[in-house]
Image: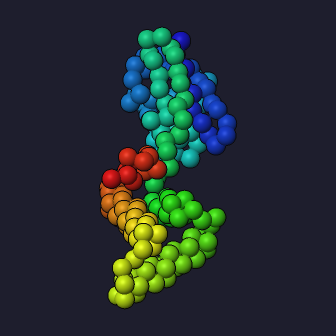
Amino acid sequence: MPHVIWREGETTRKAALPRGVTSIDELVAKPFPDGTQHVVIGDDHPAAAVSISRLMIDFDSGAVDVLSPPPPVVTVDDIRAEAQRRIIVTVGARDFTDCLVRQLNANVRANELNDIRHTRALDPAEQAEADALRNLAAVIKAIRAASNVLEAASPIPADFTDNRHWLG
């Protein structure tokens, strides 16, 4: 006989399906034979709430699975934290503060190289350094642009950390 399984906090509950129940929709209104008053499919019942996405019943075989809870809702703060993490890695920093220091130092050096350009041509080593600094700035800008796109998405994709959202 098919059973339904649901979670109440950390406790797993199991009960036989009432006679004649053939669909999940019917579970909302029928009592269980073991004395359980009602099983409500939804997040608003305090005693036996279960998200329909977490409950799967095969009425033919009686197989029941309680699926993993749905992923948490992704917020703009999650996107910004991922962008920050990517920028820290790109800069090669230990943490956020080190990242800021490295970016400030890179900006100072880029300005110095730009000042040199006003008086003479950059030598090959200086030109390579200027190119590397320009590329670093471009990557950081691209990360920020990807973050802006994800922040504006509705809904924000659950797999927002996947590189396909960040690499243009």
Residue 142 in view, yes or no: yes
Residue 147 percent coordinates (x, y): 39, 61
Where is residue 138? Give x, y as percent: 37, 66
Left-right relation of 101 to 56: right
Query: Which residue is drawn at the image coordinates 45% and 54% (left, top)?
Result: 74
Residue 49 position within the rendered picture, expressed as x and y whole percent measured from the top left? 53, 41
88 left or right, relative to 146: right
Q: Judge whether 1 appears above or below 164 on screen.
A: above
Q: Residue at x 39, y 77 (%)?
A: 122
Comparing 9 with 72, the one in front is 72
- Horizontal and vertical percent for residue 40? 48, 37
Residue 79 picture quarter? bottom left
Q: What colour scheme does the image use?
A: rainbow
Number of marks in picture: 0
Q: In which quarter of the image is residue 152?
A: bottom left
Report the front residue among 97 and 82.
97
- Say if 157 sits above or below 128 in the image: above
For this rendering, which residue is in front, 85 or 21? 85
Q: Identify the residue at horizontal 47%, vertical 22% (top origin).
A: 57
The answer to whether residue 137 is seen in the rendering is: no
In the rendered image, the vertical position of residue 73 relative to residue 68, given as above or below: below
- The answer to whether 1 appears left or right of 121 in the picture is right
The residue under the point 60% across, 36% down is 7
Residue 83 horizontal side relative to residue 154, left or right? right
